[in-house]
Amino acid sequence: MKHPLKRFFKKIKLEIFFLFLALLLFLGGTALFWVSSFKIPDLNSIQTRTVAQSTKIYDRTGQVLLYDIFQGAKRITVPFTQISRNLKNATVAIEDAEFYNHGGIKITSIFRAVFANILSGSYGQGGSTITQQVVKNSLLTTEKTITRKLKEWVLSLKLEKVLTKDQILELYLNENPYGGSLYGVEEACQSFFGKKSQDVTLAEAAYIAALPQAPTYYSPYGNNRQKLEERKNLVLSKMLENKFITSAEYTQAKTELVLFKPQEKTGIKAPHFVTYIKQYLEDKYGQKALLERGFKVTTTLDYELQTKAEALVKKYALQNQKTFNAENAALVVEDPKTGQILTMVGSRDYFDKEIDGNFNVTLAHRQPGSTFKPFVYATAFNKGYTPDTVLFDVATEFQSSCDPKGIPLDATTKPEDCYMPENYDGLYRGPISLRQALAQSINIPAIKTLYLAGIKDSLRTAKDLGINSLGDANTYGLTLVLGGGEVSLLDMVSAYGVFANSGTKNKPVGILKVEDRAGTILEEYTKNSEAVLAENTALEISDILSDDKARQPAYGPHSMLYFDNRAVAVKTGTTNDYKDAWIIGYTPSLVVGAWAGNNNNRPMEKKVAGQIVAPLWNAFMQEALKTVPVENFKKPAEIRSDLKPILRGFWQGNETYFIDTMSGRLATTLTPLETKKEIAKTNIHSLLFWVNKNDPLGAVPDFPGQDSQFNNWEYAVQEWLKLNPQNLNYPPTLTDNIHTPEMAPRINILYPTPETLLSRQNKVFVQNRISSIFTISKIELYINGDYINSTSLPPYSLTFNPSELDNLGVVNDLKVVVYDTVFNRTEASITFRLAD
């Protein structure tokens, strides 16, 4: 029985083996058939590939063409022998050092890419050789799928059998995009250097080879010139590593000064904005997609506003160059309700090479000066401080390891570590409210506000509002409030948009819609708002920055910051070294930010931003405001009366009492609001005496000296008091003797009486008998609780016509209220009957 069973299992194993072998042969044959079906276009068809569907960028109307990315694509095809050896070697060194040794693909690179893709969960790593790039750019789509990648590998192997290595490299060098409408190394060399590709130097060749990875990002005409320098040096090091050049050649090329030709002014409107949009599109869709898929891009740009902005920026920049040694300017406009960028002018002239005009200052990170202050004050308001809270604008030492006079307390502190800043005008104002301090941009109260708000929390507020470039709080000190960090104008305008939009953020956006050549919408603007700041805090900032009266001591009445019949909030900023002048202003529907200075950081004349950049901003705002409705900012809530007096502006002390202003005596429950005044009992100290900065709404600190800043702040306040003695306020011992029952007016209603039956058709004359110690100021009549009329003229006659009143019944209430000139008040009431 054992032998038949053994033969049976042996037979089963053989059948399974042959079945598996048949399946393997079938799959292998299918794969071979699939691979063999791939066709390679002939060399001529690859070389004559054209860009039939280019990407076009429009303004927000979809009618004004700002730029056709590849309009009139420039390409000069040259034989392999007419291309510089350095160009060939530079390209091979940076793109595919083993190009002449592999058969079209590199197995090690493939495995490395596959492993990286598995770890990342994507298909981002391709391990592409030059041959693969030729295949990918000429024959395949840009989709990142396994099938497409397999095709790329197979076609690369087949292409290597059809063409020689030099022919493949020739295709690559003649077809590759090098930025904008430039294709091929010949066109790139002539456009950038005015030379044929066979005549470029080693350094110039390295620059050309550095571009294909990201032509817009590395463009010599863009914002990333330093990154281009770094990549050019990488190319040279790769050439040295692969023995394409000697050490001497490497050293000479690395230090060679290469001059690029000015960028051509062709076919582009709003060039800084277009470049900004183009970079976004390349990052999202890839350069090949922009080349082939015929995108129609409708942007957020208001071209009419853009043209006005460009003209004004150039006009005022040229004036500032003569007057203030500030040769450049920039301007950004955003709709705070949507985040849409309406205008972007990155310099006075994009094509002016002498000032690096193509550099987009609106995206550059520069110190913002005092335009950073509203973020700090907003943080303080969030914590419970109010616009009425008073700080002392006096000479103050802020380094806790230095004494109040600015002398180090120990050997570990250097004299230069002590920090006793000055205001921009060298003046000290004594007690000043946060409203006035922010509106007038006074430095010392701002630094104190930053201490109260906290550096970390202030940075968090700025980040919440859209400022992402400031980094770790540990890298900043109290100078942050004066603009010690670096931010971009675009981010600042967007962040101010949160104030304009009552605490709601809309991230800056430049595109309304992207469609492909078939009309399929690839992306479309949708509103994505986020509440990031307490509404009342935003309203308080807007209320302060639009308060012309509060800023008048610094700017004068009706300055460049003021607009008749328009509520416009605005803040200026000038850096301490006078390298940057800023101004950002807004209404509920428009935010406009402008900058003036020099791209190379050369200081301007020592003038404040109000003189340098405000005229440009004002001139543009006059035009821009015509395009938006007249809107007022919603008023912030009244400051709570239950807050500590010191938080409500009573800097003389934190204990208050009420007096009657008529008698000068202590107010009573009968003292009217009109004559009641709150006064602080004199006990003058710095704010830190009364407030725990980490809990301003909490109890008065038992030991204020535990705060590291207390001693220096307190010393400065007491020194100010010595020079500015104050009247001593203490509660009176006597009480209000004017507003008493005995002093109030007396009134008797003589007619009508409760027994009177009035006719609905007859006019009623209300007769009163009035006596008063003080002159009567007014008498008011109420029927059934509704105000009817009043008089302030003797004999104080009051009348009413029942036929004109809707609230009368059979029995009705009549009330007369009498006021005298010291605000005493008396009332009398009766009921009367009305006939049907």
Image: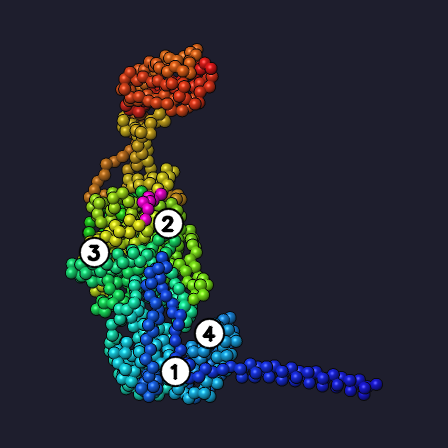
Task: Examine the structure image and report whether residue 632 is included in the region drawn in magenta.
Answer: yes
Q: Residue at x 26, y 81 (%)?
A: 195
Task: Examine the structure image and report whether residue 273 is included in the region drawn in magenta.
Answer: no
Q: Quadrant of residue 478?
A: bottom left
The region drawn magenta spans 628-634
- Kindly identify the amino acid type of the residue bearing the numbered disc 3: Ile
Instruction: Find residue 141 and name its label.
Output: 4
Whole-angstrom CA distance, mark 2 to mark 4, is 44 Å
Read off the residue under disc 1. Answer: 171
- From the viewer's perspective, is the residue at label 2 or at label 4 nearer? 4
Say whether disc 2 or disc 4 marks the residue closer to the N-terminus.
4
- Kindly identify the amino acid type of the residue bearing the numbered disc 2: Asn
Q: Residue at x 34, y 79 (%)?
A: 184
Q: Quadrant of residue 691?
A: top left
Coordinates of residue 277 in the picture (x, y in percent): 36, 64
Label 4: element kind: loop
Read off the residue under disc 2. Answer: 501
Read off the residue under disc 3. Answer: 612
